[in-house]
Image (cartoon, rainbow, N blue to C red):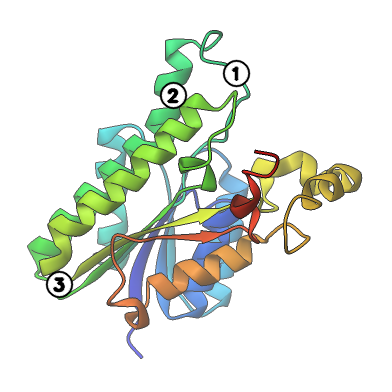
Amino acid sequence: MSRRVALVTGAESGIGAACARTLARNGHDIGVLYYQDDALAEATLAAVVEAGGRGVTVRADVSQEHEVESAYDTVVAALGPPTVLVNSAGINQSGVTVAAMSFAQWKHMFGADLDGAFLTSRRFVRELAKVKAPSGRIVNISSIHAEDVRAGAADYCAAKGALRRLTETLSLEVARAGITVNAVAPGMILTPMNARAVSDADWRRKLEADIPIGRAGTAEEVAELVAFLASDKAAYITGATLTIDGGLSLLLALGA
């Protein structure tokens, strides 16, 4: 089987790293885009190689246009044009209210959680048009908080809400080009973004009590859903947001 090329942002840890590993097992070579931790990025690359794939690590700040373009050039030169793009890079909510939030923080959140997806998706679509690829897949990692907001997370919720609209609008623009664009909205997932839940069992159990399934999810479970959306089996799904939260978002109106 000829291997495809996937570009995964935020691939050094958490959901991004799990997506890179899972896609590699499913026949993809992987462009591992990461922001800070060289050792973690190399560990992801090692897992890709162990799964039988080729890979390249590229450090980039996805909120910066020139860094995204340079990183994409590196991946294309090393592996070929990606036909799968997974936008997993992002930062978590801070707990800062609007009244207390600096404009710099607001812009930083949008840069990481929205601008990056715009910049990578734009280059992805342009590149596929240039090589006349018959199909492509974009999967954006959103959040249940794109719809179900919480106090102290205005920047995060707004960025993820905008990411959902970017997903839907872009899906219309590229559908006839054979490119599907979808989002995955996780709930509580045990990743470094939920460090306290990972390290503090009592805290985790308290949070899990609010989840109908009774437990937090894993990055690997999210990655399997992403891999499905990236596959030919999902060729008729586009503009959709698939929620993976153990039923948590269904209970947010309790007590109303």
**Residue 96 - label:** 1
* Nearest the eye: 18 or 209: 209
Tell me the residue that label 2 is attached to.
108
Compute the Cα span from label 3 to label 2.
Answer: 34 Å
Residue at x-position 31% and y-position 57%:
75
List the single residue furthest toward the right: 202
List the single residue furthest toward the bottom: 1
Residue 195 visible in rendering? yes
The quadrant where residue 27 appears? bottom left
List the single residue furthest toward the front: 256
SS of the residue under disc 1: loop
Q: Nearer the viewer, mark 3 or mark 2?
A: 2
Residue at x-position 53% and y-position 8%:
99
Amino acid type at circle 3 is Ala
Amino acid type at circle 2 is His
Please count the marks in the image: 3
Above/below status of 70 relative to 139: above
Q: Position of residue 206 (x, y in %)?
A: 85, 45
SS of the residue under disc 2: helix
SS of the residue under disc 3: loop
Q: Position of residue 110 (x, y in %)?
A: 39, 29
Give the side of residue 255 with respect to residue 113, left or right.
right
Ranked by sequence position, the earlier of labels 3 and 2 is 2
**Residue 147 - label:** none
Residue 70 visible in rendering? no
Compute the Cα span from label 3 to label 1.
Answer: 44 Å
Q: Nearer the viewer, mark 1 or mark 2?
A: 1
* Nearest the eye: 35 or 211: 211
Tell me the residue that label 3 is attached to.
133
